[in-house]
Image (spheres, grey):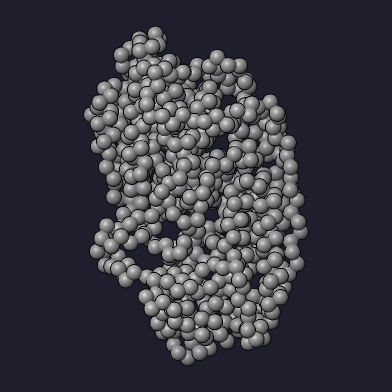
Amino acid sequence: MNSHTPTDGHPETEGRPASRNFRSSVLSGLAVSFFIHAAALVALSFIVFKGPMDQLQMIVDSVFTDERAQEEFNEDVEQSTEAAETVNYVAGAMATSGLATGGSGGPVVAQQKLEEASSLQEPTVKVNVGNISLPGLNIISDDLGSGQVTGDIGRVVEGYGAALGQMTQELVRLMREQKLLVVWLFDESESMTDDQKEIRERFYKVYDELGIVQKSDAKLKISDEIMLTSVMSFGEGINEHTKKPTSNIDEIKSAIDKIKIDESGVEKMCGAIQAAVSKYRQAANSQHRKLVVIVVSDESGDDGNQVEETIAICKGSSTKTNSLRSTPVYFLGHYSVFGYPYAHVLWKDPVYGLNHWIAINRGPETPEPECLQFDGLHGRWDVFSSGFGPYEQVRIAKQTGGIFFMLPGNEDNLTSAGSHEQRKFDLLDMKEYLPDLSSRQVYIKDRFEHKFREAQWQVVAALNPHTDEKLNMQQLWYSTDPSTFDKQGEETFKRALRAMGMLNDQVRVLESVKKLRERETSQRWRANYELMHAQCLAYRVRLFQLLLALDQHRKQRPMPSNPMNNSWDIHRVHELLEPDKEQIQQTKVDFDELKRQLDTARQELLDVIANHPRTPWARRAQWELDSGFAMKFVESYRNPNYDKVATKEIKIPKQ
């Protein structure tokens, strides 16, 4: 497990000095060596992509009618933690010709599941937006789950209060059909610390309101124990905090307070769901109860390869009273990182108060990543929202008839780009960008059969710093000592030059399928292609600027202006470094050519914003533009106590 330290908004991604010495003879020839090796590579690639890419055509689809009431998107969500005096329940859905209908006194609305819309196969589609499940309690009448229809892939709620309020109404609906055995599964990871307090405070409201309903509803008064509850938690293993399923509210509250942090750093979410279902299947069947599982977690887990086994077990755990119904699994979770498996949480050690970045599993939103894992210098550190939940959780909820409640609010312990931005997208903007929630096997087979999509996957796999360590270049904590800097600089130089060659190769791969773009029916794969191509061009320019910065820093040998500063960091800036005469002569690339390459990369990023407005692709493209295309060394201070991490004096938590 790796931890890193943010400085001036940038993570340290490769803080170790190179193992080989940079001999003084090699140092004196660094510039010459660079330009001899880079000249053909860089100059030729610049010439190949000298002209701007053709303007990308934007497809405008007709996607909805004007029959939806606007107030559905403007109604405030009730955040009160006080138990309501009355609770409205929702009647069970009726399965009619594949459409779900539900009622709470209002008109019946035919619905079409967005995830099954033909827009995923055809470029033009008309969707009845009556099924859109945003944003709050007012749409609880959309009666989903419990085997009658597939589950809800993403119901956005404004915090745990709203999520637990909707969960209450869902439990009431199920209780009106039959008795329940509910298993709550809580994630024991360190990253859930901030969530646990709020969950405990608001969790009690669920049972307070259920008690009110049971007293006021004649049908629910048939049994005093119409719902039994078990409280469990999971990390590397699974722990049960109730001796047996109970209807005693005090026992349930006490059980939640017993949940502890698992220091293993492992979250076996799928295994925990399987264990809970297997343990209580027989008890639920014998008591003619419906088994319900509710998972509270901010991670997608470490055993995502067991998604299909988990779904199969849940679907096989039907009660005797209704063999057609599976055990629905509900999730209270967070958005997934856009096209990337990881997020990073900020942790301060208790001894020195130093910042460390801890990786957690938080995505992606698709069976496999569809975006670059490389950010031009190293593995990605941003946490931009995909607009959807993690694939594993959303697929399980959908297939078992549950609901994924997505909490869009800020998470104070998240860090890096995108950590404090508004992370909720309007589903009307995202309707044509829905992720594929097929099984991984089906997804991979389908992608392989589409050359346009498979080419993109090849680029993602080739430029993956998690499988190719040399794609991680040091960004922070270069030494102010010239000899140490030379060792670090040599290694970064070699890696940057290699990465440029790899980018050139992958641009050619993308160019080879460019003509297939117009035949691609998925807006999601179109957006992936456009952003990926623009990033590859932009990263070539940035890496060339990095090589210039390394060479100039070596020649000039600057010292920090502040005597307290003891290191150098690489920052992304807007002002380009101009090649000197020697560099121009060696590379055959003049400054005007470099600026033309910059214009090409910038224009393609602007095209992404224009073609895919108000989506994660547009936001990522804007971030690339805002970050700048040049590289610059900036003096900084590195706390020497960071060296004690290696001695294990500081125990960094695992995630």
The one nearer the camera, 106 or 457, is 106
- From this viewpoint, is residue 429 visible? yes
Q: Residue at x 69, y 82 (%)?
A: 588
Where is 545 relative to 197, above or below?
Answer: below
Q: Residue at x 47, y 24 (%)?
A: 146
Where is 8 relative to 616, above or below?
Answer: below
Q: Residue at x 37, y 20 (%)?
A: 210
Quadrant assignment, res 479 = bottom left
626 left or right of 651 in image: right
The one nearer the camera, 396 or 623, is 623
Q: Position of residue 437 (x, y in %)?
A: 55, 39
85 left or right of 423 in image: left
Where is 387 relative to 533, above or below?
Answer: above
Q: Position of residue 279 (x, y in %)?
A: 31, 30
- From this viewpoint, is residue 48 visible? no
Q: Residue at x 30, y 60 (%)?
A: 353
Kindly give the residue lying farthest to the front in the view shown. Answer: 562
Q: Position of residue 199 (x, y in %)?
A: 36, 36
